[in-house]
Amino acid sequence: MDRPVKQSGTLDNLSKFAIEFDGLIPAEEGWLICLRCSTCGHQWSAARSSPEFEKEATECPQALTAKKHTGKGPKKKE
């Protein structure tokens, strides 16, 4: 799958990865991009200068452990 976020690209189409752009914050090494997961609500930041930026910007860090991602949460009563 083609990733929409590259170090020289834009933040277009993050929604197809259930990721939302949440703003910018200043850091010593430059600006960090704040992201939010639409599935679990987790927030994190990523630096465009990072070699892992493409992965960091398109995958929630909680994807393997958060109950909302894994489907292991409590069952709802109907």
Image (cartoon, rainbow, N blue to C red):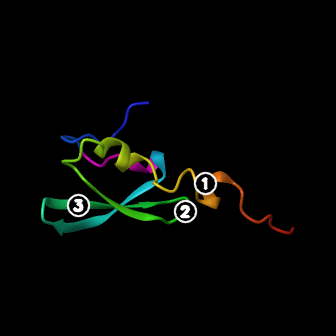
Amino acid at circle 1: His
Instruction: Pick whichever, 60 or 12, lies toward us.
Output: 60
- Mark 3–mark 1 distance (CA, rounded to whole Å): 25 Å
What residue do we see at 47% from left, 65% from top? 42
Residue on which disc 3 sits: 32
Boundaries of the magenta span: 10-15
Looking at the image, do the residues carrying marks 2 and 1 touch, with CB atoms under 8 Å apart?
yes
Secondary element at image label 3: strand
The amino acid pointed to by label 3 is Leu
Around disc 1, counting alpha carbons within 10 Å, would you say few (fewer than 14), some (14 to 19), or many (20 or more)?
some
75 vs 15, left or right, is: right
Type of residue at label 2?
A: Cys
Secondary structure at numbered mark 2: loop
Lower position in the chain sequence, tag 3 or tag 2: 3
The C terminus: image quadrant: bottom right
| Mark positioned earlier in the residue sequence (3 or 1) | 3
Q: Is 36 positioned to the left or the right of 30 in the image?
A: right
Residue 69's disc number: 1
The picture places residue 76, in percent across and down from the top left corner, at: 80, 67
Q: Which residue is mark 2?
A: 40
In percent of width and height, residue 47 lies at 23, 54
Mark 3 and mark 2: span between their CA atoms? 21 Å
Q: Main secondary structure of the magenta part?
A: loop
**Residue 77 inside the magenta-drawn segment:** no
